[in-house]
Amino acid sequence: MSEAQLKIATAFTRAASALRIPHSERAIILKKAHGLEGLPEQLLMIKDDSPELDALYSRFLTELSHTDKFDRTTDDHAISIVHSDYPERLLHTDQPPSILFYRGKCISSLNDPFVITVIGTRNPSFYGLEVTKKLCMEFVRRGVTIVSGGARGIDGQAHGVAVSGGSATVAVLGCGVDIVYPREHASLFEQIVHSGALVSEYPFGTLPRKYHFPARNRILAGLCDAVLVTEASRFSGTLITAGFAADYGRDVCAVPGSILSGTSRSCHDLIREGATIVESIDDIPRIPRHIIYRKESSDTHSFSLHCNQTENEQNDLSKEEECILNLLAAAPRTLRAVSEHCHLDLRKTALSLTTLQEKGLVRLYRGLYVRS
């Protein structure tokens, strides 16, 4: 994309947003202009048709003169609703963004045969993180593009697993793609740019605002075939995304959790309302059953090698070690709890756990033994 087109997209979006022109009307203008390149001429042609369009043209020129103040990279792009690569699924939603801004190599993976959105709480439990990791690793193995919101917690875990596996992942932001929010995701976002894209309907320089995120959630729901909620407490914002997904005819799926902690109450509410219960990714409707092998990068090779090593190590276990692994698959445990459940003395339990740690199958997390 040329720098001129990027500036036009930024100026038009800022001008239309300032004047509260809905996306449906912006789309009409873009269609008449045949895309971004013809937009300035089209705005000039129609500016006398109404006071609103005259104001839009004037504001567009003003915003165009200010576009040089934002730093951009060669990975920055904008795509209009009339472009052939615009995400097809978004076209069949209410108020699809007339222009999407993205930072990355491409967003073509959003038009793959199957796309999943994985979302959840910003304050996950260990269970939520592990469930998200387990399911997302399966998506990676099948070559499924993972979409999420780039937030702390479950979103970050989903993106991180995809990046580690060399799979495409797309983060939909509630700010400009040049703004890192949250700040601790700077490194993650940089990796996402190389394996997928950061996407937003907000132009460069737009800071995160509270009201941006409910609007962002409609895009999260619109880009996919199914929305998967892996962990979310009551009153979670994930319910907004799930609501949009149901309205768009997407499959809404949820992972059940503990009734003791309350961290999965929104998941349970969704299940009561008819969401699909997910224990493995094969529970998700319409997901491809075959495995897709993407072109391997060094990261993908490392990920596959780790999986193969883990499988080989699991084939060489004692009965005591198998018992411990099966126990820890359900939940993290203390040394004493492992000893009691597996009917082993503390010394033998400690030795077995040490062996499993050396094999990379178990790790210590905040005083609890957990499956790796």
Image (cartoon, helix red, strand yellow):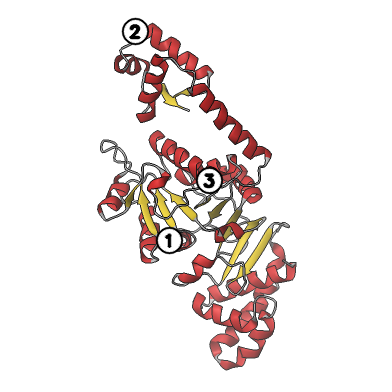
* Amino acid found under the numbered disc labelled 3: Ile
Between 71 and 219, the one lying in front of the other is 219
Is residue 105 visible in this depiction of the protein? yes
The residue depicted at 55 percent of the width and 44 percent of the height is 162
Is residue 121 visible in this depiction of the protein? no
According to the image, label 1 marks what residue?
A: 214
Find out whether the residues at labels 2 and 1 contact each other: C-beta distance under 8 Å: no
According to the image, label 2 marks what residue?
A: 345
Estimate the spatial distance between the alpha carbons at disc 3 and disc 2, rounded to whole Å: 43 Å
Estimate the spatial distance between the alpha carbons at disc 1 and disc 3, rounded to whole Å: 34 Å
Kindly identify which numbered label has been placed on residue 4: none
Q: Nearer the viewer, mark 3 or mark 2?
A: 3
The residue depicted at 45 percent of the width and 42 percent of the height is 135
The kind of secondary structure element at disc 1 is helix
As displayed, is residue 143 above or below residue 335? below
Query: Badge 3: how crowded within 10 Å, few (<14), some, or many (20+)?
Result: few
Residue 1: percent from the left, percent from the top?
72, 66
Q: Is residue 227 left or right of residue 69?
A: left
* Amino acid found under the numbered disc labelled 1: Pro
The residue depicted at 56 percent of the width and 76 percent of the height is 16
